[in-house]
Image: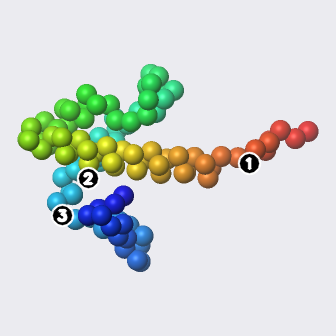
Amino acid sequence: MTIRGERTWCAACQAPEVFPENLPVIDLFIDALPTYQVPGLQGGALQEGFDRGAVRALFDLHGIAAADAAPTWEALRELEAELRTVRTARQAQQAPPAGAGHGR
C-alpha cells in the first residue's frame, strides 16, 4: 500500500510503516475483518469483500463523523484491495502444480 505517495517498509521486519493519522482506519479494518466475505462461503456471497452493512454499523461504533465517511470508505477500500491481492498471491503459492495428483 502506498502511504503519502511512498511505499515505505521497515528494513528489519518488512512491516509497513504506520503513520498515527492512519491508525483509526486500520482499527476499523481490523474490526471489519470478521465480515469479510468470500464467494462460495458464508451462505454464498456473490463477490469478495467486506459486508458493507456491517461496516456502516462499525462506522457508527467507531464514531466516524459524516464529513469523514467518504475518505474513510476510500481508505478502507484500499486496504480491502490490498487484502485481496495478498489472498490471491497466497492462493497461487499454495496451489498444487498443474496435473499434480492425477498420476496412475
Q: Position of residue 90 (x, y in %)?
A: 55, 51
SS state under label 2: helix
Quadrant of the snapshot with the C terminus: top right
Which residue is disc 3 drawn over?
20
Residue at far bottom of view:
12
Relative horizontal placement of residue 78, taking residue 23 as reference (left or right): right
Name the residue rendered at 76%, 44% in the picture. Answer: 98
In the image, 71 versus 88, the foreground residue is 71
Mark 2 to mark 1 CA distance (whole Å): 36 Å
SS state under label 3: helix
In the image, 85 versus 30, the foreground residue is 85
In this rendering, the count of numbered labels is 3
Mark 3 to mark 1 CA distance (whole Å): 43 Å
Sooner in the amino-acid sequence: mark 2 or mark 3: 3
CB contact under 8 Å: marks 2 and 3: no
Sooner in the amino-acid sequence: mark 2 or mark 1: 2
Name the residue rendered at 31%, 43% in the picture. Answer: 77
Sooner in the amino-acid sequence: mark 3 or mark 1: 3
Which residue is disc 1 drawn over?
97
Mark 2 to mark 3 CA distance (whole Å): 10 Å
Residue 65 shows in the view: yes
Name the residue rendered at 22%, 50% in the picture. Answer: 25
Q: Label 3: how many residues lie within 10 Å, few (<14), some (14-19) or many (20+)?
A: few
Instruction: Tell me which corner region of the image, top left, top right, bottom left or bottom right, holds residue 18.
Output: bottom left
Which residue is disc 2 drawn over?
26
In the image, 19 versus 60, the foreground residue is 19
Task: Identify which amino acid the numbered label 3 is placed on.
Answer: Pro
Task: Identify which amino acid the numbered label 1 is placed on.
Answer: Pro
Residue at far right of view:
104
SS state under label 1: loop
